[in-house]
Image (cartoon, helix red, strand yellow):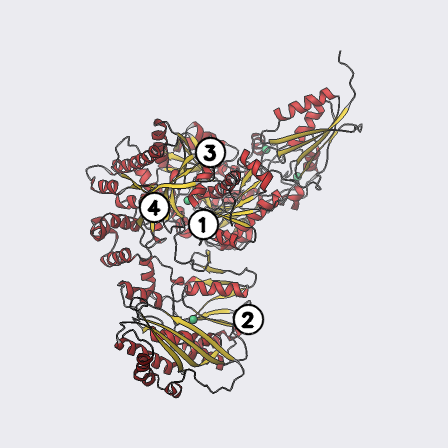
Amino acid sequence: LGHGSGGEMTQRLLTNYIQPIFNNSWVAQADDSATLPWAADQLVFTTDSFVISPLFFPGGNIGELAVYGTVNDLAMAGAEPKFLSCSLILEEGLPLKTLKRVLLSMASAAKTTGVSLVTGDTKVVERGKGDGIYINTSGVGVLLSNQPTDARQIQTGDLILLSGDVGRHGISVMACREGLEFESSLTSDCAPLNGAVAKLLRAGVEIHCLRDLTRGGLATALVELAESSCRGFVLEESSIPLSETVRGACEILGLDPLYVANEGRFVAFVPERFSNLAISILRNTEVGASCEYIGRVDGEARPQVILRNNLGCECLLQRLPGEQLPRIC
Amino acid sequence: MRPEMESERQQVEITGLVQGVGFRPFVYHLARECKLDGWVANHSGGVRIEVEGDPLDIDKFLRRLPEEKPPHSQILSIHTKLVPFQGNRGFEIHESDKSKVKSTLILPDLAPCDHCLAELADPKDRRHNYPFINCTLCGPRFSIIDKLPYDRTNTSMSAFTLCDDCRKEYKDPANRRFHTEPNACPKCGPQLQLCDAHGNILASSNEALDRTLAAVSKGQIVALKGVGGFQLLVDAADGQALERLRKRKKRPHKPFALLYPSLEAVQKDCKVSKVEADLLVSRERPIVILEAKAEARKRIHSLVAPDSPELGVMLPASPLHQLLIQKFGAPLVATSGNLAEEPICIENDEALERLGKIADCFLMHDRKILRHLDDSVLRVIENRPLMLRRARGFAPLPLMRSQIAQQATESLGSYLGVGADQKNTVALSHSGWIYSSQHIGDLENAASVERFDQAIGELTGFQQCEPQTLIHDLHPGYNSHRWVQKKSATKLGVQHHTAHFFSCMAEHNYIGPALGICWDGTGYDIDGVIRGGEFLYWNGDSSVENIASLRTFPLPGGEKAVREPRRAAAGLLYEISGFVALQHHLLKRYFSRGERRNLATMLKGQINSPRCSSAGRLFDAVAALLGLNSHTSYEGQAAEALEHSARGIQSHDAYPFNLQQQGHRWQLDWAPSVSALIYDEGKSLPQRAVAFHNTLAQMILTVAREIAEPRVFLSGGVFQNKLLTETVATLLRQNNFTVHSHSQIPPNDGGIALGQVYYAHCMAAASQPLGG
Ligand SMILES: [Fe+3]
Ligand SMILES: [Mg+2]
Ligand SMILES: [Zn+2]
Ligand SMILES: [Zn+2]
């Protein structure tokens, strides 16, 4: 890929790559904006940028991540994702083959999740000024239920449902980037969550809050929710699903898996009366096969997250302060 | 013949430690001896007296007052003024005046006095074998006080109504229990109860005591409601019981403290110096770390303190402990009643819930403990007491009355230091005193953070002041730091080792140019390096400069390395020789091939491998390289093992090292020492361990000479090491340095809060504007 001066180069990218791969009527029109049909009175709109090294990692790549990331943000708002935009920032010298692989992944991820990639933009930056590809996606969706799902809806007594084991994305990306080797190979948990969420909502499960776990891991996500809901959460360490490989990797790396990044995991706050229904639905989805209740919302406590370990000790979880810094004197 | 003088009336205001120490009865007796009329009353600012009579008698009274004051009292100030004569008849003790609001001091909990012990043992006394006996000179204080002034209604004794006999004693100025606020007897006071782990009552009163002893003899674990919280008791000679306690508490190695029946019994098992004996029998009754004799093995099972030649020993701190241990007649393990690093339990229900899976039965009573006070711990270094954990018996007495604090608080109000997150204490300066809270614990768990909150509330509440500036450590991950960030008050961040340095100067009430040697495990600094081998220079004004430190090395696995000295060893060797280091036979022993490959990747890619200049981690690494510890289960375990392995060797051998100047700073390079130590295989382990300690002492001397500042302060957890501290201090003194080390304040992070507050006062005095 050369450093384009704009016009012709970008045009070639569009006609040779983006239009045939994304392949829908909006992209085919090649207008600067897409005109979308609409029949809802509540729109959900989000945006996210994706930067990752390496671009391809076990279990995914930046293209999938860019589609699932935005799709998941819409799903967490209780929406059905409909349309996505895609802006690419490409580094001069990027092999076109690589770009093609990423675009194909995006197209197939869009298909899996039922969204259309309807508009976008491409810029090429000088060599050394980007890590191959940066992607920004924005997305719109329609609400699946009239009940809002956000931190303010969290209520005392709600159970906290975690959709699967934690830490696989962060550890597998780090292993791949740095050349670490663990007992068994590890793949990222990178996955779309909208299907599972839609199933829960369509079955009438009352969900008070949904949050996908990304950077900062389970701990950071829950601390943020505790603070914005002004409620205390109590977790049981033993019930948090964790793969043996992630446990072993965290052991040698000295990392706490609760703070490691995920890309296909979420927590749902569910009232107790829906707990059986919710878990049986979620267990029947691909992303939720190993889901567990990991704790509950505590009535009296202050806005904090307590992790009760096997000893019965109640550790206080905090958001990740930059990196995991040693504290012990 | 005495000239006739007209009677006059004086009002006397006394501030200081004058409540709960028998001060009013003392004043009553003194006034009567001096033939004066009037009254005395407590108020929350101290004690107020009005006396009238012959001016010469009043003079005599005022002269004798400070000279003959009760043993535990401390007078901060006496103000007198002439007031109109009223013509009182007789002298009275008045009820407290609650309207005056001012600061005052609270007495710590004190062990039973000789009078009370004699009554406790006297079958004819009505308090024979009564575990809650106390008097004006002894008994619970800080652990039962709810608010000032110190009156029975403001303590957890308010739940008990005095019987006629006790009330008579309480009201009778001639009785030694006159105005003893926690006065009690078997008829009206707190009662013992033995429960099983489900809270079912098994026995009460004296039968509870007997059944407790039977349970201990059978090898059971008993949870005992002590002075400032629950303790867990087992027979110190019973290996099976100890094993069960270690397993249930998930505490595999950390030594347990022992309760002994008498000093004589301690002397059979341990070497006890004069200073150590004085500490053991002191009214504060702390745990004292002593060197065990070989004979101790007959009575003390090795599981009490595995791999340690020392024992932590205490004598009974309350009549209940006295009765238990006298009847048992042999040492008992008495360890804190908590789960892992959580605070000790203080409430009956809490203990049943949290210790239910550890203890077989619970010896409890119905007097509430209002705040947790761990057993204080000291050891003797250089023939002086050194505080390791300051709590029961010492808290909440203020530490000092510093001139600078006096000036600064008068003009600038109060400072609150929230300490560090390990071994947390908080400290408050107010009207010339600096108060340090009791040991609170590690702020990683929710319960400790709650007690931290409570301790701050109490410290400021008792002093009735709103601190103007909140001072915190710079570590962004500390819960104490986060607590401060949520407040709207002015904030000041103080670097960890600066706080250590100033805590030592605070203890010596020193202001002026000085060199601070601050060696510990981990302290955050803004350059991202985990520091802990630091030399700080204060010019006596507004500049504190880090002028030298140990060479840094990576810690693969970050915080994990704290519990795995093998990681510190890997980082240390990698720093010296790169990848080859991971082929060293010691590291091959400690890590599998796969682990070494990943370790190499982590070190090369700087993955979770922060660099440190920590002396504590250097100790860990060397302990691992000498084959002592690859993993540890408690803090300081590897360093202690290294210190202990150097025992009994007299040697001045040391390894080479380099001191390099880098700009304005100096770097102590340990690499030549470590290389020499590894290949010094002709020498025994003890010889190498001593040589390592000597090397560190030589390093410190070399830097001190380079800086050429005659006053040196030693602080940081590393100076809990007796061998190192004594070697360093001797060496520095031989070279004409004045060396100051800690005594009443822990050198570890328990002193950080005090150092933060003292630093703020010193900087305020140097008129350095305090930033947020
Ligand atoms: Fe420290
Ligand atoms: Mg996002
Ligand atoms: Zn007494
Ligand atoms: Zn009585």
User: Where in the figure is residue A181, as x and y percent of width and height?
Assistant: 26, 63
Kindly report the distance in space between the C-alpha atoms of the residues bearing marks 1 and 4: 17 Å
Tell me which label, 4 or 3, sits earlier in the chain. 3
CA distance for labels 2 and 4:
48 Å
Q: Are marks 2 and 4 on the same chain?
A: no
Q: Residue at x 37, y 83 (%)?
A: A111
> Residue type at mark 3?
Gly
Which quarter shows the N terminus of chain B? top right
Question: What chain does mark 2 sit on?
Answer: A
Mark whose residue sits in front, 2 or 4: 4
In this view of the protein, which residue sits in the foreground, B648 or A206?
A206
**Residue position for label 1:** B474
The residue where tag 4 is placed is B613
Identify the mark nearer the N-term, 1 or 3: 1
Q: Secondary structure at mark 1?
A: loop
Instruction: Indicate which disc residue A153 carries.
Output: 2
Task: Relative to A161, say whether B127 is above or below.
Answer: above
Q: Residues within 10 Å of mark 4 (few under 14, many from 20)?
A: many
Mark 4 vs mark 3: tell me if same chain.
yes
Q: Chain of mark 4?
A: B
Please, what secondary structure does the residue beneath circle 4 have?
A: strand
